[in-house]
Image (cartoon, rainbow, N blue to C red):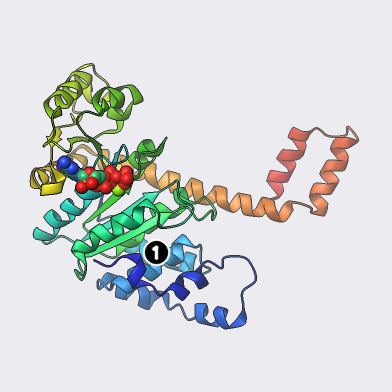
Amino acid sequence: MTSEGPAIPADAVDTAVQAPGPVSPGRRRGRRAVDVPDLVARARDGEARAVARLITLVEEASPALREVAAALAPHTGHAQVVGLTGSPGVGKSTTTTALVRAYRERGLRVGVLAVDPSSPFSGGALLGDRVRMQDHAGDAGVYIRSMASRGHLGGLAWATPQAMRVLDAAGCDVVLVETVGVGQSELEVASLADTTLVLLAPGMGDGIQAAKAGILEVADVLVVNKADRDGADQTVRDLRYALSLGGRHDLPGAWRPPIRRTVAASDTGIDELAETIGEHRAWLDSSGEGYRRRLVRAAREVEVIALAGLRERMGDVRGSAALGTLAEQVVAGESDPFRAADTLIAQL
Ligand SMILES: Nc1nc2c(ncn2[C@@H]2O[C@H](COP(=O)(O)OP(=O)(O)OP(=O)(O)O)[C@@H](O)[C@H]2O)c(=O)[nH]1
Ligand SMILES: [Mg+2]
């Protein structure tokens, strides 16, 4: 594996963070050297450094972003995006690492995105994850990257799907996305993924909590990890009961989320989990649901990018003569704020 750390020299990360502000001439010269077609070709050959550079370009909204997106587009649509979500410490990173091993044994190429919406920088808890993922160090068939909100444009909502596109275009068969279980992130990861794994552990009251929080509704596969601990049977029973109460899974032809037990720390149940994920992919393909999810995802991507663009243009409008004129009309009672806002939007 190659983590972001060793793959990109620190100065490359620094220079890439220069989106709009003033940039020193020397740095700018360095950044102009982006040869996008070459970079994409090398990423498709599995060169981790090229993949890292492409993700940095999209993450930091580089001026080359549009060219990058256009170059990637024809190569996307192959990867199965598998989201892993669940409470802190439930075993998401351990399961991710174990799944990477299972997929590598099957000869598949794997991308991993560890998404931390709570961190303003890469690092923190995820740094520990990265260290653990060193299991896969040196394997060219694995690409691992931590993503943290850097406050650009739409932040992670914006950057994560674009990083997924890079991994997809780079030839990953599976992209695993781990999100820390805070607030709405379960629902967020579900909207990004083709297949959503919800992880639970015994003794955390998780089965009941998950049912209450509506997390079962987004689960395609329920994983009771730490099945080596007391209470795993009870958690499974709780989940079965909660599922029996009905929901979207009861519709005709619907996928009923299987419950899998794992001990990720010792690789137990991981091959079965990989099988189940494969079965879900087959169902996505045969039912048309996979296509529907991709449409929803693409629509959301377009929306997020369009909103970021609008916000940027609004920034240009702020303090402009056109807005000044509209404000005068509102103050004079010749217009009202709603009509003035419509006029402004029409001018953007
Ligand atoms: N007993 C037992 N421990 C496990 C198992 N899987 C993971 N652990 C341990 O649980 C702890 C947390 O595992 P992580 O994989 O870091 O959990 P996580 O969900 O990624 O945690 P966050 O990213 O902090 O939300 C670690 O100490 C693991 O070694 C398991 O199947 N059984
Ligand atoms: Mg983790």
Q: Quadrant of residue 254?
A: top left
Q: Residue at x 37, y 61 (%)?
A: 73
Q: Is label 1 in a helix, a strand or a loop?
A: helix
Residue 189 place in picture, x, y as percent? 35, 42
Vertical placement of 38 versus 119: above or below?
Answer: below
Residue assigned mark 1: 55
Please name whichever residue, 37 or 82, is drawn nearer the observer in this view of the structure. 82
Farthest residue, direction front: 230
Q: Residue at x 30, y 75 (%)?
A: 42
Q: Is residue 94 left or right of residue 62?
A: left
How busy is the neighbourhood of tag 1: few (under 14 within 10 Å), some, or many (20 plus)? many
Residue 250 place in picture, x, y as percent? 22, 21
Please name whichever residue, 136 or 243, is drawn nearer the observer in this view of the structure. 136
Farthest residue, direction top: 245
Residue type indicated by callout 1: Ile
> For the N terminus, which image quadrant?
bottom left
Q: Quadrant of residue 179?
A: top left
Please name whichever residue, 158 or 12, is drawn nearer the observer in this view of the structure. 12
Q: Is residue 39 visible?
A: yes
